[in-house]
Amino acid sequence: MRAVEKLSENILDKLSIDFLRNQVLKNAYGNNDTVIAGMDPRILLLWYLFFGLVPWFVNDLPFLTGCFLLVAITTLLARVAGLVLFLFAIGVFSQTGYLLVVTLLFGGDASAIAPLLVLTLKVATVSLASITIFSGLDPDKLSNGLMWYGCPERLSFSISYAYRILPLLMEEFQNVLLSYRLRGNPPEHESFVGKIKYLIYQIKIIIHAFYPLMLNTAKRSRTTVEVLEIKGYRYAAVNREVKKIKLSSLRVGNNDLLFLAISFLWVAVTVLISTLI
Amino acid sequence: MTTIKRQSATQSQKLMVFVLTMALYGLATLFTELIPKFQVGIVEFSVEYFLFIPLTLAMLFDPMSAALGAATGELVFSEIMLGQFGGLGELEKFITVTIGVYIAGRLVRDPKNRKVVGIAAFSGVVIQQLLGTIVDILKVQFAVEDFEAVAGLPESVFATEGFAFLNDVLFSGILFCLLPTLFLVPKLYGKIEPLLGMQPRTEKTYIGNISWKVIVCSIVAFGVAIAAEFMAESGFALIDWEADWAESSTSFAVGIVIAAVVCVAIVLVMRMRTAKNPIEKGA
């Protein structure tokens, strides 16, 4: 019992806002020296298009396993933050593991496992591919790559902006939350009823904290937009010349081609294996 | 004179609302990814989302910018940033959130009227969840091969999805959308608008009732969400065809492998060449 208590305490400690902020920052800017981060975003997006879409449509077990192994290797290469991988594991389980339990409950038997295994492999492959791309790449590179493919300027602006504003917002949210806690009087939480009351109290505080946060963010977003306007953002966003200058840093190198070629080889081999079986 | 009558927002003010909603809702969805879910039996108590933030802002400001901002914020902060981008599935979520928030924002004529605010907030959640549930059922039906053949699976999907819908509407809908919106809208009304340099919304400056146009547009948008699924299904046939030839002739697969080997070889040779001439690499 004590061990369980200690464990849950440990997990709760880890899930502080500071930890979250560090993980997100590490994820965004901490791994710029990896193989994946050094590559051209356009090539990687192309690669993602294959591994993000094709597994949904194929039901061949060897092929899916092969794809899964490949994206697992690239995820390792991208050195993704631990939190992201943890969320991935939970996500995969909650999508298919939960379904398995309910299927068994409704009188399904072991025959339900095979299609669910296929589904799990699909989900896992697609999400690992996206983890490789979206957390392996630096946000500016990613948004440039998306822009090259003609994504709306607003999306690439949002990505760059999100990574910059998030640490600030989190810090502010934490400060507001702490000040509410300092002034508040939390209910006793020894008994079960007290625990529920405590939980409700916590949620209430979080919701109340959004009130000052909304006002502050409103001020901040006005400043942001005014600065953008000074720089002529709305006209630059639709101007071709500007886009050309912005994207001139993108270059496809030999490494990118090698990466594509090796992925192609891998997929070809898995197709071969699946025909042989 | 018409500019005074309507709640007019300039382009830059719309951008402000967009940025504001995106940042706040993005932050909130990031937290919901991390707040633990606890289950009692199959009843799942989870803080599904903090939809009250975009709902509140959509009722106070331009609904379209707030709705788009919320959907983008969720996409960028919780999906792309945490590397959980799901490709096709995200389009559906984007569209359903946009529709739900937009309609809720349009319903409110006077933010001081608590009854209308409550009804609008609740209907926003119901719309969003209902659309999401429909697409979810379709998605599972299409992703699992031999859907009908697996014993117990179809019923379980309908049951879990239907249950999740009720659960989300009753639990998250009331606790995390209705009550906070009722608390925040009157409190923020008249205070937050001047920060963006706008007039508060009143009955006179209200942009108009929900017209047929809005409903038709929403249905069309939802059609797009489903069309994405059908488009995927036509992709299904394409890959099936590919799998056909793969099964029919092993030699063809061998051919592909050889082609891939040649590709790797060519790239390696190119690499060695550029390694020899470092000037070319710099160029």
Image (cartoon, rainbow, N blue to C red):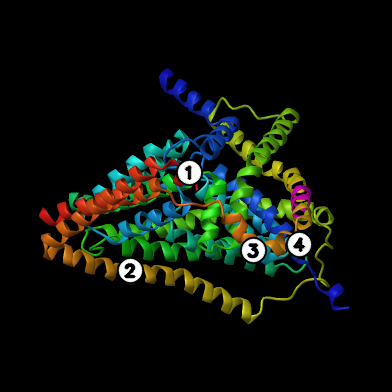
Q: Which residue is mark 4?
A: B12
Distance between mark 4 and mark 1 Cα atoms: 31 Å
Question: Badge 3 local density, few (<14 within 10 Å), some, or many (20+)?
Answer: few
Q: Is A212 left or right of A146, judged from the image as shown? A: right
Q: Is B117 left or right of B177, judged from the image as shown? A: right
Chain ID for label 1?
A
Query: From the image, which quarter does the N terminus of chain A lie in?
Result: top left
Chain ID for label 4?
B
Q: Nearer the viewer, residue A81 or B217?
A: A81
Which mark identifies residue B235? 2
Q: Amino acid at mark 1?
A: Ser
Q: Amino acid at mark 4?
A: Ser
Q: Which residue is mark 3?
A: A241
Camera-side mark, 4 or 3: 3
Q: Is B226 left or right of B171, judged from the image as shown? A: left
Residue B35, percent from left and from top: 53, 40
Check chain identity for marks 4 and 1: say if they share one.
Answer: no
Q: In terms of secondary structure, where does tag 3 sit?
A: helix
Which mark identifies residue A135? 1
Question: Badge 4 local density, few (<14 within 10 Å), some, or many (20+)?
Answer: some
Q: Are marks 2 and 4 in contact (CB under 8 Å)?
A: no
Check chain identity for marks 2 and 3: say if they share one.
Answer: no
Report the residue that reaches farthest toward the bottom: B212
Residue at horizontal 29 percent and vertical 48 percent from the top: A262
Report the residue that reaches farthest toward the right: B1
